[in-house]
Image: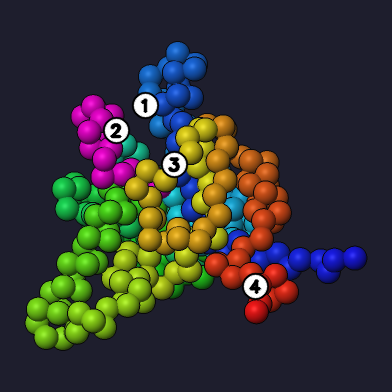
């Protein structure tokens, strides 16, 4: 009888929240209605994911490529983030959730940036769960910016180019100090990362579901966690008994 395999818990869960527009179109509603319901799903999901004991949650909300959408939809998405922070900050703080917004802040409304900074400051000492919202975020830009900062240090003589390590790159990323995602979920049936956490997901497990984001619930999370627990995470390693010997 084989020994029972130890299952590592999910300490960092990341979600590509996709399908708001399709959810609305299926109901003959404007796309913005799907986004509004999607925010309600965020509100519920943060609660049941925290109750599941997951220590860190990263949500992909708005990508750097989403600026190409119609201006009215973009403005609505900006207002939704502002409304979410204003409406939920007190509850998040009371529930010991630390909030961080990752992504470029250049080009965002000054009032929204001020609100983001306030939310991060108020919740900075909270310890139950870390909630990261990737807003105006693109992983390629994040990695390029990290490389540029390291190149500047090399140019200033502070760092030898030959001494640049993955650890030094990681230290320049917006997720520095957090574990890499154990599990990345994408809703709506799309099977791609879409420029999300490319560096950090090197050894993440992926779970793709046809469920549209507004319909994401605790049962969907449970199914994803069950699938995750059936997998064996090797990180490039194998058991010694399976290795090739001379």
Answer yes or no: do the residues labelled 3 and 1 have beta carbons within 8 Å?
no
Q: Nearer the viewer, residue 154 or 107?
A: 154
Q: Earlier in the sequence, mark 2 or mark 3?
A: 2
Residue 32 got which mark? Answer: 1
Name which residue lies at 45% across and 60% down. Answer: 202
**Marks 2 and 3, how far apart at CA:** 25 Å
Which circle, 1 or 4, is nearer the viewer?
4
**Marks 3 and 1, how far apart at CA:** 24 Å
Q: Nearer the viewer, residue 205 or 225?
A: 205
Q: Is residue 210 magenta?
A: no
Which circle, 3 or 1, is nearer the viewer?
3
**Marks 2 and 4, how far apart at CA:** 57 Å
Question: Which residue has dot 2 on it?
Answer: 76
Q: Residues within 10 Å of mark 1 (few under 14, many from 20)?
A: some
Is 159 located above or below residue 41 in the figure? below
Of the 4 image quadrants, the one containing the N terminus is bottom right
Question: Which residue has dot 3 on it?
Answer: 192
**Marks 3 and 4, how far apart at CA:** 34 Å
**Marks 1 and 4, how far apart at CA:** 57 Å
- Element type at mark 2: helix
Q: Which residues are magenta?
A: 60-76
Instruction: Locate residue 230: give its quadrant.
Output: bottom right
Q: Nearer the viewer, residue 130 or 241?
A: 241
Of the 4 image quadrants, the one containing the C terminus is bottom right
Is 30 located above or below residue 111 in the figure? above
């Amino acid at each position: 009888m084989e020994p029972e395999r130890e299952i590592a818990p999910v300490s960092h869960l990341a979600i590509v929240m996709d399908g708001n527009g399709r959810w609305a179109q299926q109901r003959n509603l404007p796309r913005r209605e799907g986004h509004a319901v999607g925010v309600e799903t965020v509100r519920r999901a943060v609660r049941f994911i925290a109750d599941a004991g997951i220590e860190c949650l990263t949500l992909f909300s708005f990508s750097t490529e989403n600026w190409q959408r119609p201006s009215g939809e973009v403005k609505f998405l900006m207002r939704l983030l502002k409304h979410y922070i204003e409406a939920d900050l007190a509850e998040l703080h009371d529930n010991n959730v630390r909030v961080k917004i990752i992504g470029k802040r250049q080009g965002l409304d000054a009032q929204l940036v001020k609100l983001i900074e306030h939310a991060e400051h108020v919740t900075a000492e909270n310890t139950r769960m870390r909630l990261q919202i990737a807003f105006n975020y693109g992983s390629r830009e994040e990695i390029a910016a990290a490389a540029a900062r390291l190149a500047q240090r090399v140019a200033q003589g502070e760092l030898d180019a030959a001494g640049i390590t993955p650890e030094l790159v990681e230290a320049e990323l917006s997720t520095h100090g957090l574990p890499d995602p154990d599990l990345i979920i994408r809703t709506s049936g799309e099977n791609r990362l879409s420029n999300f956490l490319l560096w950090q997901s090197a050894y993440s497990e992926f779970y793709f579901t046809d469920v549209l984001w507004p319909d994401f619930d605790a049962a969907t999370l449970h199914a994803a966690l069950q699938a995750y627990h059936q997998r064996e995470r090797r990180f490039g390693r194998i058991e010694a008994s399976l290795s090739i010997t001379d």
